[in-house]
Image: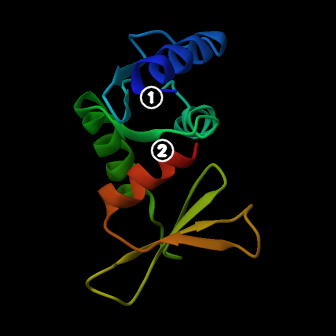
């Protein structure tokens, strides 16, 4: 399957899940497919699951328009960390660390053994949360 055929199949699969070209952009290339998630209503995890069914190189990323949404979530994380040093977003908990290079730690509370996902700055943590929702 080439990039064009894979892109057509991925588009039809995304439509079955209720996503349109306003939500997700799918572009074909000679060797693969690039996908841009444009709106916060799209489940990044679901897009990854759909794409993984195809044996072709794919690149999935947030569109630049999502930068505002990531910034809003990052601001909520910064404002929401309470005196105990923790903030909860869905099944994820953000905690403060002693490190100045990586002041925040993201933990998937519902994951196996409270899986630590990232330890980065607020925008990185927000993007990681959005990718996993």
Among all residues in the image, which is located at the extreme left? 64
User: Residue 130: which numbered mark, if any?
Assistant: 2
Mark 2, other Cα within 10 Å: few <14 / some 14–19 / many ≥20? some
Q: How is the image coloured?
A: rainbow
Nearer to me, 19 or 13: 13
Where is residue 69 drawn, in percent x and y? 34, 35
Quadrant of res 48:
top right
* Among the two numbered marks 1 and 2 on one chain, the one whose residue lies closer to the N terminus: 1
Quadrant of res 43:
top right
On screen, 111 above or below 116? above
What residue do we see at 40% from left, 52% from top? 126
What residue do we see at 43% from left, 39% from top? 58
Where is residue 131 drawn, in percent x and y? 49, 46
> What SS does tag 1 mark?
loop
Residue bearing mark 1 = 40
Nearer to me, 94 or 36: 36
User: Residue 7: which numbered mark, if any?
Assistant: none
Would residue 85 appear left or right of 30 to someone viewing this image?
A: right
Nearer to me, 89 or 7: 7
> What SS does tag 2 mark?
helix
What residue do we see at 58% from left, 69% from top? 107
Work out how far the residue at label 1 is from the one at label 2, CA to CA, in angstroms: 8 Å
Would residue 72 appear left or right of 6 to someone viewing this image?
A: left
Tell me, yes or no, whether the two marked residues, 1 and 2, touch with CB atoms within 8 Å: yes
Q: Quadrant of the C terminus?
A: top right
On screen, 84 above or below 106? below
Where is residue 85 drawn, in percent x and y? 48, 75
What residue do we see at 63% from left, 49% from top? 90
Say how many tags the image has.
2
Nearer to me, 32 or 85: 32
């Amino acid at each position: 399957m080439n990039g064009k055929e894979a892109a057509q199949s991925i588009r039809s699969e995304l439509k079955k899940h209720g996503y349109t070209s306003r939500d997700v952009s799918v572009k074909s290339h000679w060797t693969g497919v690039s996908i841009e998630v444009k709106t916060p209503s799209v489940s990044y995890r679901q897009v990854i699951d759909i794409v993984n069914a195809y044996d072709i190189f794919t690149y999935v990323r947030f569109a630049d328009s999502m930068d505002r949404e990531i910034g809003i979530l990052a601001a909520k994380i910064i404002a929401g960390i309470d005196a105990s040093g923790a903030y909860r977003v869905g099944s994820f908990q953000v905690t403060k660390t002693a490190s100045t290079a990586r002041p925040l730690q993201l933990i998937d509370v519902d994951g196996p053994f409270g899986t630590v996902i990232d330890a980065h700055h607020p925008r990185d943590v927000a993007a990681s949360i959005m990718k996993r929702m």
